[in-house]
Image (cartoon, coloured by chain):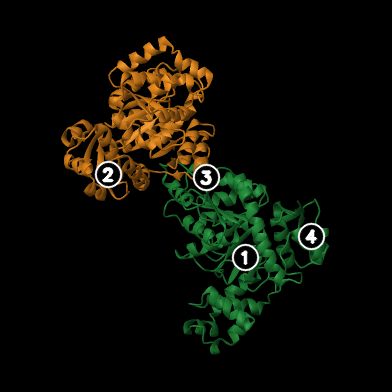
Chain colours: A orange, B green
Amino acid sequence: MTADSLCLDEALAWLALLRAPGLGASAIRALVARHGSARSVVAQARREPSIPSAARDAVCSPDREAEVADRRWLDQPGHHLIPFACDDYPALLRDIPSAPAALFVAGDPTHLWSAQIAIVGSRNATASGLANARAFARAFAQSGNVVTSGLAEGIDGAAHAAALDAGGTTIAVLGTGTDVIYPRQHADLAARIRISGALVSEFPPGTIGKPEHFPRRNRIIAGLSLGTLVIEAGLKSGSLITARLAAEQGREVFALPGSIHSPLARGCHKLIRDGAMLIETADEVLGQLRGIGERLADHLRGRLGDRAAGSGQPGPARETAKRDPEYVLLLDALDRTPASLDELAQRSRLPVASLSSMLLVLELDGVVSAASGGRYVLA
Amino acid sequence: MTADSLCLDEALAWLALLRAPGLGASAIRALVARHGSARSVVAQARREPSIPSAARDAVCSPDREAEVADRRWLDQPGHHLIPFACDDYPALLRDIPSAPAALFVAGDPTHLWSAQIAIVGSRNATASGLANARAFARAFAQSGNVVTSGLAEGIDGAAHAAALDAGGTTIAVLGTGTDVIYPRQHADLAARIRISGALVSEFPPGTIGKPEHFPRRNRIIAGLSLGTLVIEAGLKSGSLITARLAAEQGREVFALPGSIHSPLARGCHKLIRDGAMLIETADEVLGQLRGIGERLADHLRGRLGDRAAGSGQPGPARETAKRDPEYVLLLDALDRTPASLDELAQRSRLPVASLSSMLLVLELDGVVSAASGGRYVLA
């Protein structure tokens, strides 16, 4: 199943589950896996003992007003609901223990499958911190990586804006519905991101930001990304949560050092003492992620292999390509001129959902490079 | 044998060996150990096949002019020659693989037995680096530690001066003879150090500074100290040599982080990546060194036990004190009012050389604290 093939009834059933009070992501994932679809869960909710009673009542008597709003959100162009069960659900995020049950995406959901580097940091950043955020975001974008962050003031906003200014792609993960932009002064930035990247949230449309949403949002930033770079963070900064989650998820954590007299260097220094890599240049991050990318590619290849028609055996991408007719089709479709996912789908006659995962494997293996605008070329 | 009991003939014999071309520290140490004294080595130099011929000629036909200069240096008050074979030779320095064959000291040699922390860094330090050097040196001195450095411009000079200004003690290790002050603008600073601390060198009087002397000097700075703190260093800074030697000698290396845009933070960042402890405050260094001090105390206690009349068994200082009559005498002599080494020698009737090593063990065990002016109190 891909996000595009999700019918309206199934999408609305997912939304009913996602909006049900007290029904967590892991419970929803387990229910849908057991019943085969969200519609089946909703249909059998009355007889499903694992659903708490308040959630059962909500699922069986949905809020019609919310349903109207959800239909309106789903109807808008560029809006996508990507449930965990869907092939378009990003592979790296799927790997984390607390993966969201579904993602709401406003923008191009294929970017979720590109190699992402998270840049996070203080809302009250210094001028020097903001300049560093811009410089690293620009370098990551120019090397074909997507810059992922949290749309917050300070470091987050600077990183998003610089990635866009460099002609790159950026993903903002929100602690609100994708239609509720917080902070308000980032409305224009969010509009640009929706066009050239994606706004992503696990919260249904209309959800306003609550303090507890933002630490939860951070696990998605870390989970989508190959690594997380922290630029300026106080000792109580939420960025330290993102970094801790990234480390727990087996992703690399990078931190910029600073003056011992700067309170906003303290968090970064703590991370470095705890094992984060001390970073001076963007190239150091990119160099380190190449190695991680290879390990993740092996892992993904194994998982995709289990799911796909190809051999389930992990192995270098070129080897996979020789054996797997789908990879042969994709490599034939690629050339030295950047091509979009849609162009590659036309040329190879492969579904976009398969393409995006195959391209990530090839990209992590260094066979394919991501170019600006979500396009791909042979490396 | 202590430095004070070294007779002039033996001192001059040591000087003849130290001045002999091509005779390294380890060769001299081995020769003196085999022959029992420097005088015996000189007397039998003609028949000693392990001495290279140029060195043999120099030892057998000493430079009379140099000998006059050496006698003049030895005659001056506060000047001490401390050969490796002497009990006054500092225990921590004795432990390093390339320990100097002898030390020339201008000042109070008992400071060499105090707990020392090295502060080193760039000659071209920034204003902020100099302020950091001063602040850390002040804190170390005020907590009863001796600040050891290399008398160079920049960080070294700032650390020495701040330790003295705080009423503390500082040791300058030179790449020249103790009578040849380099850089010249530190002549006044060197004069203050000689009064309130010690100038130390492995190079005989009159030796002028050569480029190769300074990296050699760095091993003594690191070897005398429990740990080495690097404050601002470029990637080619000699401070990185000091830090590497400290690490190789099993001592702790500390480094201050800085802006990623500061070339003088690069060396510190390299050290942190290589395992040095990232430091924000002086208390972090002091806390870390307490643990190291305890380990070194165990080690020293074992070594001193082998040499001294007491049981050779390592064990906590209070246990040692119960068993060892010399430690009982010393603990009886100590009280809550700081007392100098001479006062403690008078009260306990123990020789100063034994006292200094016993006090270091007690200090590293936390039984005794070093007070300003080389005095000691019960902790």
Label at residue A198: none
How far is the residue under mark 4 from the one under mark 1? 22 Å
Return the chain for callout 1: B
Q: Is residue A169 above or below residue B320?
A: above
**Dot 3: what SS?**
helix
Residue receiving disc 1: B105
Q: Nearer the viewer, mark 3 or mark 2?
A: 2
The earlier-in-sequence mark between 4 and 1 is 1
Residue B188 lies left or right of residue A151; in this view the side is right
Identify residue type, mark 2.
Gly
How far is the residue under mark 3 from the one under mark 2? 43 Å
- Residue B11, by quadrant, is bottom right
Q: Is residue A177 visible?
A: no
Farthest residue in the front direction? A47
**Dot 4: what SS?**
helix
Label at residue B343: 4
How far is the residue under mark 2 from the one under mark 1? 77 Å
- Residue A373, by quadrant, is top left
Residue A219 percent across, percent down from the top left: 45, 32
Q: Nearer the viewer, mark 2 or mark 1?
A: 2
Residue A112 percent across, percent down from the top left: 33, 32
